[in-house]
Image: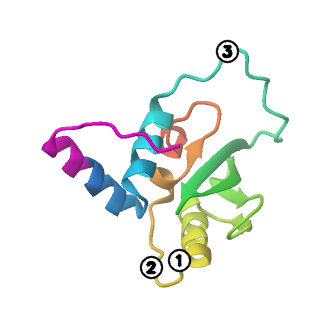
Amino acid sequence: MTKNVAVDDVTHAQIDLLARAWDVSPGEAVRRLVENFRAPSPAAAPPPSTGGRVAVHAIYDGVHIPGLYDPATQALTITEGPGAGAYRTPSGAASAVLQALKPQVKPNRNGWGFWTVDDSGELLQTLRRT
């Protein structure tokens, strides 16, 4: 079901800018923003054991891509879907997703801003060690 939301011209331009930067529709850009600030449900079941790895996901071109991030090595494994496999860095994994879904697009992406932590809804950047 499609619903319309009225926004001023400046906000509309900002949504369009985010949509172009993320290579998604304006509606998907708004959905990502809302998802980023949504509080986790208190009744949610605890996540399954991941062996110390952190469950993450990305949504690119409308496709949900699950993964596991290893804080000790900073490696990221795409567990299923486009680009499935193990990568030395979150950026390598992000590039693999782009190559799989849109090979005509330059695949360079900052993986720290591409992946979202499942439990918190925050970008993977929040877990990056210096």
- Residue at 44 percent across and 72 percent down: it is 108
At x 70%, y 43%, the residue is 55
| Residue positioned 47% across, 84% down in the render | 104
Contact (Cβ within 8 Å) of mark 1 with mark 2: yes
**Pointer 2 residue:** 105
The residue to which callout 1 is attached is 102
Disc 1 marks a residue whose amino acid type is Lys
Secondary structure beneath label 3? loop
Instruction: Estimate the x, y position of residue 13 in percent, counting from the top left.
Output: 20, 51
Q: Which percent across, then down, holds residue 116?
A: 56, 44
Q: In which quarter of the view is residue 121 placed?
A: top right
- In the rendered image, is residue 31 in sight? yes
- In this rendering, would 106 be left or right of 83? left
Residue 124: mark in rendering: none
User: Any mark on residue 42, and which?
Assistant: 3
Cα distance in 3D space between marks 3 and 2? 39 Å
The region drawn magenta spans: 1-14
Ranked by sequence position, the earlier of labels 3 and 2 is 3
Please rate how many residues cluster around mark 3, counting C-alpha atoms within 10 Å: few if below 14, some from 14 to 19, many from 20: few
